[in-house]
Image (spheres, rainbow, N blue to C red):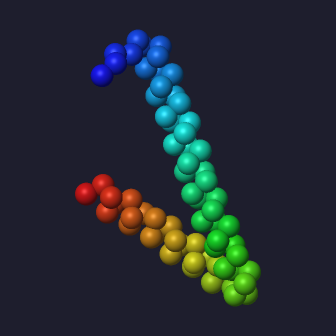
Amino acid sequence: MTALSGDALLQALNKAKDETKSGLCDVFTAKLERLATHIRTNYLTPTESAELLEQEAEAIRNQHYENQN
């Protein structure tokens, strides 16, 4: 294992943080695009669209908590 200096460690952490943010952005924008397509294709009403978004938020939240245990 290679020891990193304080600056190198900070740079590595910042790079990992930036890569994580970029990955999360890709995942969530793809999910939003799929939801938008579903809403348009199925002519969902505003209320149905809001309910769909709430269901997706709950599913993401539940998946997060399941992965923590």
Q: Residue at x 59, y 44 (%)?
A: 22
Q: Is residue 14 above or below residue 25?
A: above
Quadrant of the image containing the C terminus: bottom left
Q: Residue at x 30, y 22 (%)?
A: 1
Residue at the left extreme?
Answer: 69
Instruction: Identify the image quadrant of residue 58.
Output: bottom left
Q: Is residue 36 above or below residue 67?
A: below
Q: Position of residue 50 (x, y in %)?
A: 62, 76
Q: How many marks?
A: 0
Q: Position of residue 5 (x, y in %)?
A: 41, 12
20 or 46, which lies in front? 20
Q: Residue at x 39, y 16 (%)?
A: 4
> Does residue 46 appear in the picture of this structure?
no
Q: Is residue 41 above or below residue 16?
A: below
10 or 39, which lies in front? 10
Q: Residue at x 69, y 87 (%)?
A: 42
Instruction: Identify the image quadrant of residue 6.
Output: top left
> Does residue 51 appear in the picture of this structure?
yes
Residue at the front extreme?
Answer: 1
Q: Position of residue 26 (x, y in %)?
A: 61, 53
Q: Position of residue 60 (x, y in %)?
A: 46, 65
67 or 44, which lies in front? 67
